Image: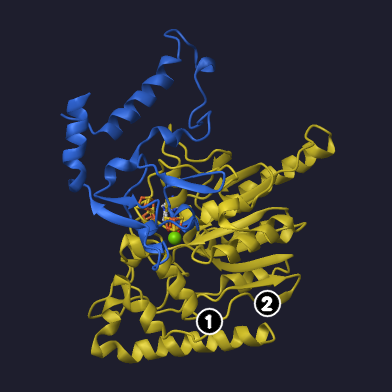
Chain colours: A yellow, B blue
Amino acid sequence: MALPDLAKKPQRFTGGHRACAGCGFPITIKIILQAAENPVVVGCATGCMEVTSTIYPYTAWRCSFIHTAFENAAATVSGIEAAYRSLRRQGKIQQDIDFIAFGGDGGTYDIGLQSLSGAMERGHKLVYVCYNNQGYMNTGIQRSSATPRGANTTTTPAGTQLPGKPQHPKDLTAIMAAHDIPYAAQASMSHWNDLYRKAKKAFAVDGPAFLNVLSTCRLGWATAPEDTVDAAEGAVQCNVWPLYEVEQGKWKLTFKPKKPLPVADWMKQQGRFKHLFRADNSQLLESIQQQVDENWQRLLERCGE
Amino acid sequence: MTLSSQTKNLLKAHEEVDAKIEPNAGWRDLPIGAVIPQGGTATQFATGDWRTIRPVWSKEKCINCHRCWLYCPDMSWISEDGRIQGVDLTYCKGCGICANVCPTKVHAIEMHPEDDFKEDEAAKEGGK
Ligand SMILES: Cc1ncc(C[n+]2csc(CCOP(=O)(O)OP(=O)(O)O)c2C)c(N)n1
Ligand code: SF4
Ligand code: SF4
Ligand code: SF4
Ligand SMILES: [Mg+2]
C-alpha cells in the first residue's frame, strides 16, 4: 500500500483531541484504523488515549467507542463481540464488524493482564492493541512493567538511592504468544508499513490477535516533540524493541537492523535516561546493553535466524 | 475572568446539551449520562491555539510522499485524491513532527514562530 492511496480512505480518528503536541499514540490509532476494512467497535481502557480523545461532550472517534475502566478493556470488548455473535446467529445483524480493544502498557502489562489473558484464552475474535508508551503517563509518569530498566519515573526517581527503574521490562508479546492465539506481533508507530501489514493480518485471523505497538510519550520520555518518530525508530534500531510476529505458533522477525545501534545512542536522546551518562552509572549502562543483546539472541533463535 | 476560547467552546457545547432538556422533564426524559450521541465532535474543538511554531509548506518542493500526512498526530495535512493540498492549522499544535519526517533532501516544510505571522493576521483582521 502506498501512502497517497492510504490517505484516500476516510479517517475515523479526528483532530481536536487533547493529547500533548507530538504525542505518539494518535499515529498508532491512525495506522491501525486505516487498516480496518469493516466498521469498527473500539473499547479503550482509562489512560492518556481515552482521556485525551473523549473529553465530554467531545470525541475524536468517528466510530462506536466505549470507555472501560483501567483494567477491563479486553473483558468489555469480548462481551461486545459475544453479543454480536449472538445477534448475528439470530439474524439481527448481517454486517461484518471489527472489534478493537486499546489499552496502555499500564492497562495491559499490569492491571489489565488477567482480563486480557481471559479474552485471549476464550478465543474471541478481537484485536487487542497495547499502545505501549512505557509508563503510566496519564497520572504523571509512574513506572510500569513495560518501563525500560534505568528510566527515571516518579516511582523510580533517579537520584542518590536509585539509578531509575531497577528491573528490565517483561516480555508481554511472548506471554501473549504463549496463549497460542492465531496472531501476536510487536510493532512500532515509526515503521508504519510493518504496523499496517500486521494490523491487516490481525483483523483477518479468525480468533484473537494481539499487537504490542511502541508509541512514544514525549512527555514521559523527555524528548523534543518533533522527535517522536525518531525516538520510536531508535528503539527498533538498537534492538530494545524488535519487530516480529508469531503466526500460528511460528515466530518471524519482520525487521533486522543492518547494524544495530548501541542502546546508549537511543537513550542519549531522552531526558529520562540522562543520569545513566554519569560516570558512576557506566556499569549499569553496560549491563542494560548486555541484557538487550541476550534478549535479541534469544529472539533470533526463536525465529530460526 | 477572561475565558479561553477552548473553555468557551466547552461551555457552549454543554449548554447545547442542557437546552435539549425540557424544564419540567422527569428523570426518564434526561439524556443518558456520559454518552456522546455523535462521532467526531472533537472537530469542534480547535487545538490550534496551543501552537507557538507553525509549519509552512512549499508546494514546489513537495514530492507528495505523504509522510507528513501519516505522522501528524493532529490530522492536519489535507490530502485530496492522493495529492497533498497543504496544512490546515485548525488543530495543528506545532509539534514539528511533519517538518522532521519530510525527507531531508526535500525539506518542503519549515517551522516558523507564530510571532512572525502576528502582523499578517492583525492586518487581515483590520481589513475585515
Ligand atoms: C483502578 C484504577 N487505578 C488507577 C487509576 C488511575 N489511572 C488512570 S490512567 C492511569 C495510568 C494509565 O497508564 P497506561 O495504561 O500505561 O496508559 P497511558 O496513560 O500511559 O497512556 C492510572 C494509574 C484508574 N483510573 N483506575
Ligand atoms: S503524557 Fe505522553 S502519552 Fe499522554 S498525551 Fe502527553 S505525550 Fe501523549
Ligand atoms: S506541526 Fe505537528 S500538529 Fe502541526 S501539522 Fe506538523 S505534525 Fe501536525
Ligand atoms: S512529507 Fe514533505 S515531501 Fe512528503 S508530502 Fe509532506 S510536505 Fe510533501
Ligand atoms: Mg502507558
For the residues labelled 1 and 2, the Cα–Cα distance comes to 14 Å
Taking the image as drawn, is residue A115 in sight?
no
- Quadrant in which residue A178 is drawn: bottom right
Q: Estimate how packed mark 1 is, as few (under 14), some (14 to 19) or many (20 or more) residues with alpha carbons within 10 Å.
A: few
Label 2 marks which chain's residue? Answer: A
Q: Which badge, 1 or 2, is on the more N-terminal residue?
A: 2
Is residue B74 visible to the viewer in this orientation of the structure?
yes
Please name whichever residue, A299 or A105, is drawn nearer the observer in this view of the structure. A299
B35 displayed left or right of A165: right
Q: Is residue A23 left or right of residue A280?
A: right
Residue at the image position 40 percent from the left and 20 percent from the top: B16
Of the two numbered discs 1 and 2 in the rendering, the one whose residue sits closer to the viewer: 1
The local secondary structure at tag 2 comes to: strand
The image position of residue B109, as x and y in percent, is: 35, 56
Q: Secondary structure at mark 1?
A: loop
Which amino acid type corresponds to the residue marked 2 in the rendered image?
Answer: Lys
Where residue B126 is drawn, which disc sits there? none
Question: What residue do we see at 67% from left, 82% from top?
Answer: A303
Q: Percent position (x, y) of residue B31?
A: 50, 22
The residue singled out by tag 1 in the image is: A257
Seen at 35% across and 88% down, the residue is A284
Task: Give whichever of A300, A272 is nearer the camera.
Answer: A300
Vertical placement of A208 versus B114: above or below? below
The residue marked by circle 1 belongs to what chain? A
**x, y percent for residue A304:** 69, 86
Q: Circle 2 sits on which residue?
A: A252
Q: Position of residue A59 (x, y in %)?
A: 47, 37
Q: Quadrant of the C terminus of chain B?
A: top left
Residue at horizontal 43 percent and vertical 70 percent from the top: A147
| Residue at mark 1: C-beta within 8 A of ligand 4 | no
Q: Amino acid at mark 1?
A: Pro
Tell me the quarter of the picture where residue A204 sits. bottom right
